[in-house]
């Protein structure tokens, strides 16, 4: 069946890369004699990023000598020695288009099971000095694969590899890899993949999402920005004001889904041309004129929120992008929890409007945290909406004020596990959370401990998402800023969540490189247009792909790792 040609190990090391330090175990070297293979590792081996490599499901990485011969010819390289692809076992035979997920093999004293193809990761390119290597492995159908250790034991170079059981479904490693990363997926193969118990949980989840995706939902609205008129401004609390927006000529606006947001670009004042995103705070139509309503907190040093509170007037025009966002109220019949803190009430308030408009019979829990009554926006509005629902429950938490006599629905402090249990929040509810990150993290953990499944806990974050830079050694967080060096002369690029607008310079290889130069938090893994970890909503603009992705992202989104701006561009980043 095959032969084990080399056993390769290496402990994680700190490797300098593009001005950063990467903790990686990609550097492997052949060893002589026998090595014990244990449940999590080959003796003497280690991985730097256990979120993507290593562990019980990915204990041993396999790559083929035939693929080495292939890449030596393709890349014109004679320096590719065994271990160069980060594999633990270099083998003769076992090609990716013949080995199947769930296959079991005996090598020496040990027995193994195939669990998934190699993870597409930038570190293989870093190790080989070929930045596009992650994409090449997928495009050329030569990823290699991971093994789970079923029986521990010693192995050595020269051991025969014997197939002991064929995997159910007989779905090859190459087909599995293409199913995740390449277009033109076969629905039958997706179903087959989901029926293979040995397939790693992460890949199973990805395939479940692909199987459920169907056609992307079309976003209502218009391309780019269009001018909308300020129809009115209402003070909601000590630091929150609502702005109603409609069309200058009175034509109807497309309906938004409850929970979506608008990206707004001011046209006057010192914050002109800056872009910020604000949730719609009521279900459309928000007023008799059928316009939108956003609600904005006046941040102490916020130039845009400051102008909205002090300089914006009824009749002014602002540029607005169409409603967008995936934090939306889903259809259903089960219980619903709408939980918020401070200005985080806005998207869940829009959801409450929608439920009240239809007198939805679902049991509802409305939980809100505010500093005190003076900072409790929408109190009367939410009370009126809750009164229209047949099975609504409300609880308010004031962090700096005590309840008044008779206010049984008010507590001093913040939500706790005990208070959630006392309120009777059901464990089969769908929960929608919005507020400061710490609030959502704490409440989300409490709801999970209370019995809610993680996929039923939905959160909305207005600030940039937490960075996901696998293997990169953490450094102190830096507030986003203009990039160093001379300003560019190209089209403006705006990172809307981070509040940065800067002209493009070809000194940056990609939009991802520009974001990193501005210390905008970024999320990526392959950096070559394969894994789609960096996919980012495109508010407006157009991009060019310097490295064509193996599969284009959904309309209205871009892969920032391999694209540059072709025109003024606003990214939800």
Image: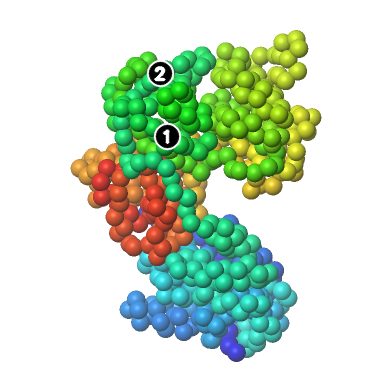
Element under label 1?
strand
Residue 154 in the image: state x and y as whole percent. 69, 79
Q: Say which of 341 and 33 sits in front.
A: 341
Residue shown at 30%/45% (left/top)? 541
Taking the image as shown, residue 187 lies to the left or right of residue 302, namely right
Tell me which colouring the rendered structure shows. rainbow
Element under label 2?
strand
Residue 388 position by quadrant: top right
Residue shown at 40%/82% (left/top)? 70
C-alpha gap between disc 2 and disc 1? 17 Å
How crowded pointer 1 is (Cα within 10 Å; few <14, some 14-19, many 20+) is rated as: many
Taking the image as shown, residue 31 lies to the left or right of residue 81, namely right
Please tell me the numbered disc located at residue 92.
none
Which residue position holds label 1?
Answer: 262
Taking the image as shown, residue 368 lies to the left or right of residue 242, namely right
Residue 4 position by quadrant: bottom right
How crowded pointer 2 is (Cα within 10 Å; few <14, some 14-19, many 20+) is rated as: some
Number of callouts: 2
Q: Quadrant of the C terminus?
A: top left
Residue shown at 32%/78% (left/top)? 76
Q: Residue furthest left?
A: 489
Which residue position holds label 2?
Answer: 232
Residue shown at 67%/65% (left/top)? 56
Q: Say which of 561 and 246 sits in front.
A: 246
Residue 514 in the image: state x and y as whole percent. 33, 46
Q: Quadrant of the N terminus?
A: bottom right
């Amino acid at each position: 069946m095959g032969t084990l040609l080399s056993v390769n190990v290496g402990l994680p090391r700190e490797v300098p890369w593009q001005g950063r330090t990467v903790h990686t175990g990609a550097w492997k070297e052949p060893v002589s004699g026998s090595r014990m293979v244990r449940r999590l590792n080959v003796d003497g081996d280690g991985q730097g990023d256990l979120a993507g490599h290593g562990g019980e499901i990915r204990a041993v990485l396999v790559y083929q000598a035939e693929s080495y011969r292939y890449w030596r010819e393709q890349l014109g390289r004679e320096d590719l020695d065994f271990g160069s692809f980060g594999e633990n076992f270099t083998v003769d035979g076992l090609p990716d288009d013949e080995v199947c997920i769930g296959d079991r093999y005996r090598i020496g004293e040990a027995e193994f099971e195939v669990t998934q193809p190699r993870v597409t990761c930038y570190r293989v390119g870093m190790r080989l000095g070929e930045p596009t290597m992650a994409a090449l492995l997928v495009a050329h159908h030569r990823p290699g694969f991971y093994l789970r250790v079923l029986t521990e034991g010693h192995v050595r170079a020269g051991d025969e590899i014997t197939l002991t059981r064929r995997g159910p479904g007989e779905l090859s490693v190459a087909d599995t890899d293409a199913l995740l990363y390449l277009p033109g997926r076969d629905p039958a193969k997706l179903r087959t993949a989901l029926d293979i118990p040995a397939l790693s949980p992460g890949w199973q989840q990805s395939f479940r999402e692909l199987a459920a995706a169907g056609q992307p939902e079309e976003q209502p609205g218009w391309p780019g920005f269009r001018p909308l008129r300020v129809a009115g401004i209402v003070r909601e609390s000590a630091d929150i004001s609502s702005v109603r927006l409609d069309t200058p000529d009175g034509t109807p606006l497309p309906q938004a889904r409850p929970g979506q947001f608008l990206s707004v670009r001011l046209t006057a004042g010192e914050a002109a041309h800056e872009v910020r995103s604000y949730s719609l705070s009521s279900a459309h139509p928000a007023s008799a004129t059928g316009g939108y309503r956003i609600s904005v907190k006046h941040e102490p040093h916020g130039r845009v929120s400051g102008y909205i509170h002090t300089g914006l007037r009824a009749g002014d025009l602002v540029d607005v992008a169409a409603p967008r966002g995936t934090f939306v109220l889903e259809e259903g019949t089960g219980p619903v929890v709408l939980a918020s803190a401070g200005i985080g009430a806005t998207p869940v308030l829009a959801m409450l409007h929608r439920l009240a408009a239809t007198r939805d019979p679902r049991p509802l829990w409305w939980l809100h945290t505010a500093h005190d009554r003076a900072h409790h926006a929408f109190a009367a509005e939410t009370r009126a909406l809750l009164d229209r629902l047949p099975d609504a429950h409300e609880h308010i938490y004031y962090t700096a004020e005590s309840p008044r006599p008779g206010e049984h629905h008010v507590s001093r402090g913040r939500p706790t596990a005990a208070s959630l249990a006392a309120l009777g929040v059901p464990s089969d509810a769908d929960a929608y959370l919005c507020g400061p990150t710490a609030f959502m993290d704490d409440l989300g953990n409490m709801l999970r401990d209370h019995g809610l499944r993680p996929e039923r806990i939905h959160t909305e974050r207005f600030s940039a998402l937490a960075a996901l830079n696998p293997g990169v050694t953490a450094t102190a967080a830096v507030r986003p800023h203009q990039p160093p060096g001379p300003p560019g002369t190209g089209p403006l690029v705006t990172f809307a969540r981070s509040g940065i607008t800067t002209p493009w310079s070809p000194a940056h290889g990609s939009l991802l490189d520009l974001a990193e130069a501005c210390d905008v938090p970024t999320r990526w893994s392959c950096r070559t247009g394969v894994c789609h970890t960096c996919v980012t909503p495109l508010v407006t603009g157009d991009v060019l792909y310097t490295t064509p992705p193996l599969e284009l992202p959904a309309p209205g989104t871009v892969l920032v790792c391999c694209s540059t701006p072709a025109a003024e561009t606003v990214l939800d980043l």
